[in-house]
Image (spheres, grey):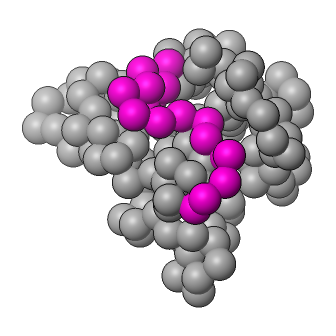
Amino acid sequence: LDTENVLGIHFRTGDSTAFGVANSDVRAAGSSLEQGYNRMLQCAAKLATKLNIIPMIDSRSSSSIEKLHFYLATDNQHVKDMAMKEEKYVIHLTSDKPSAYLRADGDRSAFLELYLLSKTKGLVINQLPKNYVGHATRLSTFAQLAMNIGFMSDEDTLPCSLD
């Protein structure tokens, strides 16, 4: 994977949506998951243009069509399922099923995704909804950590509003 030519996307849907945890951490849910996924791809294409990321051959296809390549980290299996069917872009992701971070397999998967996001050329992060009530930060602290590990500047990132 040519990480200098791949853009990272961190699409956090929230503990309540992803894992059924009883709290107010809902960043995207229901039909808005599809809309949010598509919005994240729009934001990623915009940042890819700004960072001069070059489309590369889609090795999954028999044709030599060039597409933008994104690495997607998400806490939601439905979002991963949509990404695996994506045709406009090449979406790289782990085969791990998202799980709550309090489980050993959740920790392993989180560390792997954190590392992979930090190696991309830039990062798109979804923001909290405007109507969110709770203690969470506007941008995921997980994504902020990936930015810091990867020494990304503010110019290398794009907060993406799903509202």
The quarter holding residue 15 reads bottom right
The quarter holding residue 86 reads top left
Q: Residue at 75% of width from left, 54% of height from top?
A: 142
Q: Residue at 73% of width from left, 30% of height from top?
A: 132
Image spot of residue 67 (x, y percent): 36, 25
Up the image or down, 40 lies above or below 137; here it is: above
Please count the marks in the image. 0
Q: Residue at 36% of width from left, 27% of height from top?
A: 31
Q: Which residues are magenta?
A: 21-39
Comparing 15 with 79, the one in front is 15
Q: Is residue 50 visible?
A: yes
Q: Is residue 31 magenta?
A: yes
Q: Residue at 63% of width from left, 72% of height from top?
A: 101
Q: Is residue 58 visible?
A: no
Left or right position of 44 against 93: right
Left or right position of 111 against 30: right
Image spot of residue 110 (x, y percent): 62, 67
Which residue, as the protein is rendered here, is positioned at the far front?
22
Left or right position of 101 against 155: left
Image spot of residue 66 (x, y percent): 32, 24
Which residue, as the protein is rendered here, is positioned at the far left?
62
Which residue, as the protein is rendered here, is positioned at the far bottom?
104
